Amino acid sequence: MADQHRDLDDLIDALRVRPDEAVDLRERPTDADFGMDKEAALARLADTRTAIDLLQQRLYAEGTRSVLLVVQAMDAAGKDGTIRNVLTGLNPAGIHVTSFKAPGGPEVQHDYLWRVHQAVPRRGEIGVFNRSHYEDVLVVRVKRFVPETVWRRRYEHIRHFEQLLTDEGTTVVKVFLHVSKDEQARRFQERLDDPEKRWKFRAGDLDDRALWDDFQAAYTEAIERTTTKDCPWYVVPADSNSRRNMAVGEILRRTLERLDPRIPDPEEGLDGVKVV
Ligand code: AMP
Ligand code: MG
């Protein structure tokens, strides 16, 4: 068992991008099984959720730090499913999930980080971003919403922004759910064919799919330029839902374990106090 855990540690660590590492997404697996079948991955994630819940309680009790998990992916890679499966059953009071759509209203009247900064977790919370400020160097780049000079300088803003969060007590960890183009086609078809799932499909999804290579290039550069020692990216194989969810759970749990949040010392003089 201990050996198995060490193996899994190594497999999860292998997903982490190193600072200054050249990233080639074609070389990175979309279909790793981590030596587990589906049932083993589900069981492992159930244990991991329990561990995350306890760690989050300690994080809240400590009250000084927070964790931000950023989830990015191509369409149908499973952002929603990952967030649901990793966080289900945890104390809702301790978790804050924010989904970022195309900006509108007051959001477009401000810089691109304005809405993002407002959504970062409070002390004691785990915050999760379903899409994020990274859209401003991804879709915005691929669809040419702003000129290159504008999106290119954002890498530096993002590094500094995430460093600010880190310095002020928010640990930032970023996952790219890496799905294959074939698996995306299969999932799109399933969405189209299943009346319960069709609402998730937009015609625009096919336009984005046609720009697959451009998106992969944009992800590659974003990951390379914003991976730092403190704010790593993990490229998580996403063709298998159960293993993908398991792996993201592991990443979140390890992040919390490294923080090792401590329950504060109780007030003095409570020994022997009887409640009457
Ligand atoms: P979904 O996550 O499938 O509900 O779709 C949300 C949509 O919002 C995606 O098409 C994103 O590309 C888009 N989106 C999110 N953030 C931005 C942004 N900053 N600029 C433009 N589009 C964005
Ligand atoms: Mg979508």
Image (spheres, rainbow, N blue to C red):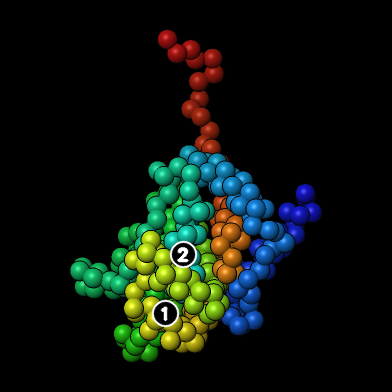
User: Residue 79 bears which disc, if any?
Assistant: 2
Q: Amino acid at mark 1?
A: Leu
Q: Nearer the viewer, residue 94 or 261?
A: 94
Q: Nearer the viewer, residue 145 or 273?
A: 145
Q: Position of residue 238 (x, y in %)?
A: 56, 68
Q: Position of residue 9 (x, y in %)?
A: 70, 59
Residue pointed to by mark 1:
138
Above or below for 91 versus 272? below
Q: Name which quarter of the figure residue 196 lies in.
A: bottom left
> Residue lying furthest bottom in this view?
148
Above or below for 68 versus 20? above
Residue depicted at x 56% and y 62%: 241
Q: Position of residue 140 (x, y in %)?
A: 36, 81
Residue depicted at x 55% and y 41%: 54
Q: Amino acid at mark 2?
A: Lys
Residue 72 appears in the figure? no
